[in-house]
Amino acid sequence: MNWNKAIFLAHASEDKERVRKLYRTLKENGLEPWLDEEDLMPGVKWDDKIKEAIKNARFFMACLSKHSVSKTGYIQKELRLALNELEQKSPDVIYFIPALIDNVELPNITVGTINLRDYQAVNIFDDNGLDKLIRHLQKQANIISEIKKKENPNFQDLRNSISKGQIETALRLLMEIVKDKNDDLYNTCLLTSSKYNRVSKENILGIITRESYTMETNQIVYSILEIIKILEERENYN
């Protein structure tokens, strides 16, 4: 499984047959869906593996129906796990996709500063909506492929973290790379990391608006990308 392209399919057990069909359709269109009955190996601790898949997947697709929005159970747990992951990602990263397989309203679920209803849903109970979703996912997957073609293998983990919106992980990896460099680049990394810690704390405490948080985290991501560019240029020069 290529986690940089994986699509976790969350669904109610009552919708299993429709989600199986969606799984096959996504596969036929060159995408990489993750479905419990297809991708869980015999003998594994399924709860741990599902949590791991939600954390590692590039996309989380919430397949919402009259069953999943009205019941309590594991589907609600998966939605909350995904929203928690979403809160930790860069605001411009597309990760959580509400996909309506029935004509229903989005459930009112909030985790931290994230509310499920803030995210645009797509109707996939009609062909136009499903085609739109597939084109969107193919485009995102192609973008990821282009990034991987151009990247320096020495910075692969760092770029993967950025593509998943895992800014804290990216900064940790970056500090490991520059820790022995006693120059301006090291100081820049320290300042960038300090800024991210401040912004994250202010966001948790509700001191800054969501708009301000988005703007500042985007600036931090751009700073990280600029530092990677400098490091790559240095390696090429040497």
Image: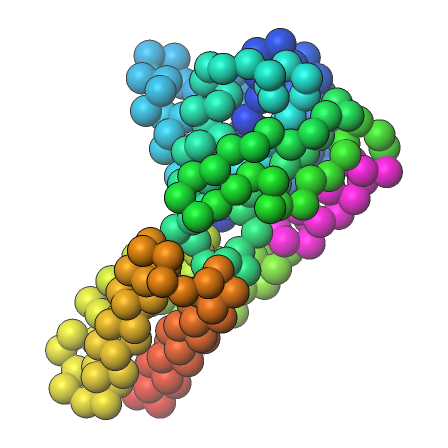
Using the rendered view, name the quadrant where residue 15 is placed.
Answer: top right
In magenta, the rendered stretch is: 128-141
Name above or below for residue 12 compared with residue 148: above
30 and 98: which is toward the camera: 98
When the figure is inspected, residue 96 is found, relative to residue 9, above or below; the finding is below
Q: Is residue 194 left or right of residue 6?
A: left
Membership of 82 in magenta stretch: no
Apparent side of residue 171 relative to residue 53 in the rendered image (left or right): left
Outermost residue, front direction? 207
Percent across and percent down for residue 102 are 75, 23
Q: Quadrant of residue 52?
A: top left
Q: Position of residue 131 (x, y in %)?
A: 81, 40
Q: Is residue 229 left or right of residue 149?
A: left
Foreground pick, 95 / 183? 95
Q: Name the residue rendered at 46%, 63% in the picture.
A: 209
* Quadrant in the picture for the C terminus: bottom left
Residue 134 lies within the magenta run: yes
- Closer-to-camera residue (53/109): 109
Depth check: 3 or 163 in front? 163
Q: As drawn, is 51 to the left or to the right of 97? A: left
Q: Percent x, y for residue 118?
A: 60, 46
Main SS of the magenta part reads: helix
Q: Coloured how?
A: rainbow
